[in-house]
Amino acid sequence: MKLSDAPDEQLGDIDPAEFRKRLHEVADWIADYRENIGDYRISPAAKPGAIRAQLPGDAPEDGEPIGNILRDVDRVIMPGVMHWAHPQFVGYFGATTTNPGILAEMIAGALNINAMTWRTSPVATELETHVLQWLQQWLGLGDEFSGVVYDTASISTMHALAAAREEASSAIRQRGLSGRAEVPMFRVYASDQAHSSVDKAAIALGLGEENVRRIASDAEFRMDVGALREAVFADLRDGFKPLAVVATAGTTSTASVDPVAEIASVCTEHGMWLHIDAAYGGGLALLPECAWVTNGWNDADSLVINPHKMLFVPFDFSVLYVRNIVRLRKVFTLVPEYLRGDAAGAEINYMDYGVQLGRRFRALKAWMVWRSFGRVGIAARIREHLRLAQLFTSWVNEDPQFELSAPTVMGVVCFRIKAADDSASDALNRRMVETINAAGETYLMQTKLRGRAVMRMGLGNLLTTEQHMRRVWQIIKDTAAKLAL
Ligand SMILES: Cc1ncc(COP(=O)(O)O)c(C=O)c1O
């Protein structure tokens, strides 16, 4: 068939009138979902493989009407969804879905632009720079810092350590690490509570997982600076080169905050890069009464914060700030021939600051969410989460059947159910979480602290109210009554 003979209906997009109709349907579907989210069962009841079993195995040969596909969203997709945005979902750090964020994601999807260079869509770059500066102002980071948006904190931390690695040795960018006797054996330090993304960064950067030294934490799960000093001295004695410390502001299990200012002194003494993982806890900086969380930040070389963890921007949105960001740019700028025209003349092309070339227009959702609530509105919502976490903590403390497992610092509470036979208590705590989660009315995490299994809840959803937390506590107590006989 000649190209010109192709029937029109086989080409181009779906019919505009049909699209408009479906768009309205989807808009209503989303609004209904948001309004009724509290009525859903949180964790899907589906067994592994049950969802795929409902899908045809063969790739679609011929197209189907969009109406059929949307029906399958309700029939096949929805039963397999974990409803993170449910107000009684208290797994991880909660979920930061917001209505302005959803609107922004819809618009960004329609635009489908690429933020790799300024020219590939000027507004994507300029809005990114703009929201990065808003956030920087809120965090109180000095002008010597500049930021870049990535998808996740794992990627942010990897880029920070790549810059540290380049600065601490010569020409790793050009010549790599392997087969070079003059390249030292680097060591990276992080507390025993730091996130596994530090290890992953070491793996990706060829530093080696074994060269991430886990430093003991104190009774409140903060890095022990004395132990850090000892580890650095021991490594120097043994011929290693201390490269970087990753200090955490808001650890994954207990939301503890490492003593960053003291760690910064150790970094200065030994010429180490200080990276702060404020992926979760960084958001606290927006509350004037929590300014303590930012102690030592301006002595850092880099800091990551995930606005998708505390600042109500829908997943994914991670920001890396670097002091004198040229140090990061030097590692990653590489302009392919076909982009030379696009890259010319612009002040910032964000593709120069990382591994990825194509970049989503993520700034739009931060801009829309942060304008909708303002700092005051964001801070008020976080403050309410802190209040709810303290309230929940008081319930745990007042109930002789339970005990707190770590101080409640932010919107995270770690606690245990006691068992008559202590040797059975780890299994009981794990069974509590599994039973509660399987029932679908709330969703918690289990973690390990000092070798003991504990239950953990995290707040982050602006739909979560005191009433929801009272219900979560009741579910925990009812489950305890059933299991701890
Ligand atoms: C403290 C901390 N850092 C880093 C990460 C990794 O985050 P991401 O999923 O954005 O890579 C997490 C994940 O929860 C975290 O808790």
Image (tube, rainbow, N blue to C red):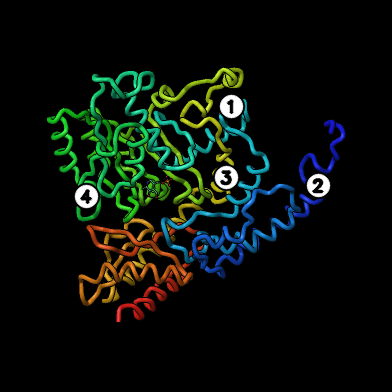
Q: Residue furthest bottom?
A: 485
Q: Nearer the viewer, residue 25 or 322?
A: 25
For label 4, the crowd category at 10 Å Cα-Cα, with few meaning under 14, some 14 to 19 and many 20 or more, is many
Kind of residue at badge 2:
Asp
Residue, disc 1: 118
Secondary element at tag 4: loop
**In the image, what residue occupies the spot 57% across and 46% down?**
371
Look at the image and tell me whether residue 19 can be seen.
Answer: yes
Give the mark toward the camera: 3 or 2.
Answer: 2
Secondary element at tag 2: loop
Q: Kindly tell me whether mark 4's CB lies below 8 Å from ligand 1.
A: no
Q: Nearer the viewer, residue 350 or 388?
A: 350
Question: Residue 440 location in percent, x, y?
Answer: 48, 69
Q: CA distance from mark 2 to mark 1?
A: 33 Å
**In the image, what residue occupies the spot 49% across and 41% down?**
151
- Seen in the image, is 183 located left or right of residue 320? left
> Label 4 near label 2: C-beta < 8 Å?
no
Labels 1 and 3: the sequence-earlier one:
1
Numbered mark located on residue 15 in the image: 2
**In the image, what residue occupies the spot 40% across and 40% down?**
304
For label 2, the crowd category at 10 Å Cα-Cα, with few meaning under 14, some 14 to 19 and many 20 or more, is few
Look at the image and tell me whether residue 345 can be seen.
Answer: no
Kind of residue at badge 3:
Lys
Kind of residue at badge 4:
Ser
For label 3, the crowd category at 10 Å Cα-Cα, with few meaning under 14, some 14 to 19 and many 20 or more, is many
Labels 2 and 1: the sequence-earlier one:
2
Labels 3 and 2: the sequence-earlier one:
2
Numbered mark located on residue 365 in the image: 3
Secondary element at tag 3: helix
- Seen in the image, is 19 located left or right of residue 205? right
> Label 3 near label 1: C-beta < 8 Å?
no
Name which quarter of the figure residue 78 lies in.
Answer: bottom right
